[in-house]
Image: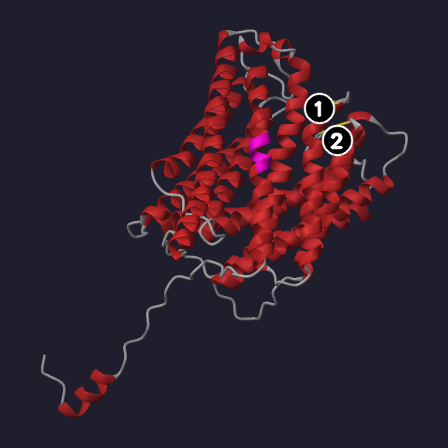
């Protein structure tokens, strides 16, 4: 081929080549003002909830493990431990991390609202934790928010709800304005705002149920209906927080996520739109009707399920071609991949649920632990920004995998036993384990639960070491300046 004429070679040589479209950068700019102190407060509440829930989970696993459970007054220990463990490890932990993220996402106005909300939520969580030791109360195994009928527990739950209401009100009032041009940061901000809206709808649903419930209804039926509508709405909150965490962690690992911010926003908007089926369900059907329950379940499956799959696939595909990771990013990747794995396992198990047996807790344990691992990864990511050291090393990288493997063994044991009809929310002799296979399944559950407890405690150890390391470095620096 002949060379180009000199009259054309110059202009063509100087003309820049078309830019190759890069993958969106999913991440959030974190402020450096007073919001960091409030965000640290919410993080500390979440860590305290995990520590206390871990202590109660020891009793929970022991009460279901063949042989060991004979040493405990199983029925009382199991039910009380289950109530407090679930409320601390899900309701308080998830809400505290949401408070941390919403504080970092919003503006610096109305700080007094934020501190009052944190104080109320912390006092409520403390009261719920102390209630089993302060007086008698029946353990009600209601879905989403199990309760103890002890007055201290009910007072703590109400105080916690008031704190969450203040948190959500401040988060919505301080939500950053978003324009029409969305980048990766804008998409994540939209996701966090949508999670706050979903929580507001959940609080509305709880109040609505309380207002219309028959006064003569009591016991488990009362609390089951009371928390059903709001509990379904909260699942959108947890799902949106998890999807934000997946994308943020993928960006921090250098992954080129093949999902444009506009498509991501569409997934978040679909989940948000499904949340508003909740008030329609209250207007269309009585809260105690089968139609009311079925409509809320359908909305959760549509809005949550459809949004999760494309985001999860895009994140995993983006990680496949990610560059070699720095030491500080390895714990983030471990938390991200283990989160996707556990959530997918929980989703698959949900397809095969039939009847009321331990396959049901296997399903929601997988999904809930998927959210927990994603939030653990975000804590690792944000610790340096919050003024602490960056977790790294084998302990920080291995912790998510140990926790995930333990929980996977736990839910496999539950699925195995559920195939033999072992009932949920029972323990000890009430489980009626008839065959060696049933005993083996629940034994695997107990072993996996014990490993998961160790993995959860290691997360606390890693975080506390990072916090202590930062304080030691700060003290050394101040001494050198003197």
Q: Which residues are magenta?
A: 48-52
Left or right of 229: which side holds 38? Answer: left
SS assignment for the magenta stretch, majority? helix
Q: Residues within 10 Å of mark 2 (few under 14, many from 20)?
A: many
Q: Quadrant of residue 359?
A: top right
Can residue 408 be seen here? The reply is yes
Please determine whether, in this image, residue 160 is positioned above or below residue 219: below
Count of marks placed on residues: 2
Would you name the residue on which mark 1 appears?
A: 132
- The stretch drawn in magenta includes residue 20: no
Q: Residue 468 in the image: x percent, y percent?
A: 45, 42
Q: Residue 185 in the image: x percent, y percent?
A: 50, 62
The residue closer to the viewer here, 283 or 329, is: 329
The residue located at (53%, 17%) in the rendering is: 417
Would you name the residue on which mark 2 appears?
A: 153
Residue that sits furthest to the bottom in the current view: 7
Can residue 295 be seen here? The reply is no
| Color style of the picture | secondary structure
Q: Residues within 10 Å of mark 1 (few under 14, many from 20)?
A: many
Give yes or no for contact between labels 1 and 2 (Cβ–Cβ under 8 Å): yes
> What secondary structure is found at the residue carrying circle 2?
helix
Which quadrant: the C terminus? bottom left
Q: CA distance from mark 1 to mark 2?
A: 8 Å
**Mark linked to residue 375:** none
> What secondary structure is found at the residue carrying circle 1?
helix
Q: Residue 404 in the image: x percent, y percent?
A: 45, 32
Left or right of 393: which side holds 188? Answer: right
Q: Residue 164 in the image: x percent, y percent?
A: 70, 47
């Amino acid at each position: 081929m002949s060379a180009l004429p000199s009259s054309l070679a110059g202009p063509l040589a100087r003309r820049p080549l078309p830019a190759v479209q890069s993958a969106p950068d999913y991440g959030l700019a974190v402020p450096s003002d007073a919001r960091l102190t409030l965000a640290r407060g919410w993080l500390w509440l979440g860590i305290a909830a995990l520590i206390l829930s871990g202590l109660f989970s020891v009793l929970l696993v022991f009460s279901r493990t063949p042989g060991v459970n004979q040493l405990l007054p199983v029925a009382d220990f199991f039910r009380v431990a289950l109530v407090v463990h679930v409320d601390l490890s899900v309701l308080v932990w998830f809400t505290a991390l949401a408070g941390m993220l919403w504080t970092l996402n919003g503006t610096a106005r109305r700080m007094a609202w934020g501190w009052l909300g944190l104080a109320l939520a912390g006092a409520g969580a403390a009261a719920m934790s102390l209630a089993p030791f302060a007086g008698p109360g029946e353990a009600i195994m209601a879905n989403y928010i199990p309760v103890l009928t002890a007055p201290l527990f009910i007072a703590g739950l109400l105080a916690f709800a008031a704190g969450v209401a203040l948190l959500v009100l401040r988060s919505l009032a301080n939500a950053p304005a978003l324009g029409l041009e969305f980048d990766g940061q804008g998409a994540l901000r939209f996701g966090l705002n949508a999670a706050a809206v979903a929580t507001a709808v959940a609080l509305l649903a709880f109040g609505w149920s309380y207002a219309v419930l028959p006064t003569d209804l009591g016991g488990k039926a009362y609390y089951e209906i009371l928390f059903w509508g709001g509990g379904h709405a909260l699942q959108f909150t947890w799902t949106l927080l998890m999807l934000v965490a997946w994308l943020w962690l993928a960006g921090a690992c250098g992954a080129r996520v093949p999902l444009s911010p506009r498509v991501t926003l569409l997934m978040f908007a679909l989940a948000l739109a499904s949340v508003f089926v909740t008030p329609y369900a209250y207007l269309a059907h009585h809260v105690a009707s089968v139609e009311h329950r079925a409509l809320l379940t359908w909305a959760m499956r549509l809005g949550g399920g459809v949004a999760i799959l494309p985001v999860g696939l895009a994140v995993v595909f983006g990680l496949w071609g990610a560059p070699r990771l720095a030491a500080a990013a390895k714990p983030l990747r471990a938390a991200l991949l283990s989160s996707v794995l556990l959530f997918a396992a929980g989703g698959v198990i949900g397809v095969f649920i039939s009847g009321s047996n331990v396959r049901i807790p296997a399903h929601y344990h997988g999904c809930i632990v998927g959210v927990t691992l994603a939030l653990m990864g975000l804590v690792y990511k944000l610790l340096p920004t919050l003024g602490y050291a960056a977790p790294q090393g084998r302990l920080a990288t291995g912790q998510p995998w140990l926790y995930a493997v333990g929980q996977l063994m736990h839910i496999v044991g539950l699925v195995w036993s559920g195939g033999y009809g072992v009932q949920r929310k029972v323990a000890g002799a009430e489980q009626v384990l008839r065959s060696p296979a049933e005993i083996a399944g629940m034994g695997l559950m107990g072993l996996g639960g014990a490993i998961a407890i160790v993995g959860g405690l290691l997360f606390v150890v890693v975080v506390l070491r990072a916090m202590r390391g930062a304080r030691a470095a700060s003290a050394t620096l101040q001494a050198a300046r003197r």
